[in-house]
Amino acid sequence: MSRLVVVTGGTRGIGAAVAARFRAAGDEVVAVGRAECDVTDEDAVAAFFAGLGPVDVLVNNAGISTSAPLARTRLADWEAQLAVNATGAFLCTRAVLPGMSSRDSGRIVTVASVAGRVGFRYTSGYTASKHAAVGLTRAVAAEVAGTGVTSNAVCPGYVRTDMTDQTVRRIEERTGRDGEAALAAMSPLGRLLEPDEVAFAVAFLAAPEAGAVNGQTLVLDGGGVQ
């Protein structure tokens, strides 16, 4: 049976791969970019989801990142990352949860990060926002436990996306090192993840057969974060 799947940040990178996987499975997919809905805007989120009808799967994937030592982290950058990565997931989840609960059916999957499980230097805003996203996932899971709705997160390491390309460039500009090699060396895999690998994990957590999986953070890093 075809499901209505909403993927925020769904027009490129991980989101585009997630959207493609669900479409290939025969689902109806709404891939949302900022032009369609600013996930940090409460009214815009409410209006967007009100016009969709019953959502079967929500993938909270919209995200941004910046990096700087804490002492040089601007308040605006801190607040922007919390707004998109944490508040955006909250607003979208809040918009779909009543309908899912009333139908006793639904899947919420949030794309977080290994930075939602551990801390990394120079990423205070990003790390804090991803920890918040993981906390939200677990809180929602506690509310829906024992129902047909689940809430889970995937926590990938560095993925080959436009966002990671920016990180690679920053490393190279600041250090003169090979940026991709530096990031790959931080992972037990010894390489970057591909977007399709994250999409596979999202699809698994969103599967109808995954009803017993709730409140989990599925780490995709080859074994580094326990």
Image: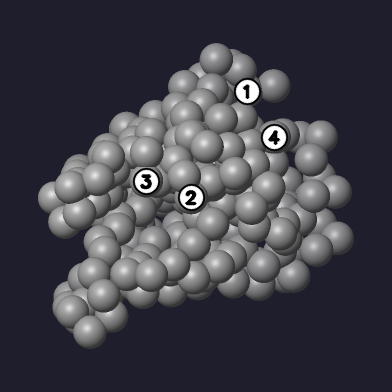
Question: On the picture, is 200 further left or further right than 159?
Answer: right
Reading the image, the residue beneath label 1 is 2
Q: Residue furthest left?
A: 173
- Earlier-in-chain disc, 3 versus 4: 3
Mark 4 to mark 1 CA distance (whole Å): 16 Å
User: Quarter-wise, where is residue 45 in the image?
Assistant: bottom left
Q: Which structural element holds mark 4?
A: helix
Vertical placement of 217 versus 31: above or below?
A: below
Mark 3 to mark 1 CA distance (whole Å): 42 Å
Question: On the picture, is 74 further left or further right than 105?
Answer: left
- Earlier-in-chain disc, 2 versus 1: 1
Reading the image, the residue beneath label 3 is 182
- For badge 1, the amino acid type reads Ser
- For badge 3, the amino acid type reads Ala
Reading the image, the residue beneath label 4 is 204
- Taking depth in this image into account, of 148 and 21 the one nearest to the observer is 21
Q: Which structural element holds mark 3?
A: helix
Mark 2 to mark 1 CA distance (whole Å): 39 Å
Residue drawn where x is 73% and y is 46% of the image: 105
- Taking depth in this image into account, of 80 and 169 the one nearest to the observer is 169
- For badge 4, the amino acid type reads Phe
- For badge 2, the amino acid type reads Met
- State yes or no: discs 3 and 4 in contact (Cβ < 8 Å): no
The spot of residue 77 in percent (x, y) is 21, 71
- Earlier-in-chain disc, 3 versus 1: 1
- State yes or no: discs 3 and 2 in contact (Cβ < 8 Å): yes
Vertical placement of 69 versus 47: above or below?
A: below
Residue drawn where x is 29% and y is 43% of the image: 179
Reading the image, the residue beneath label 2 is 186
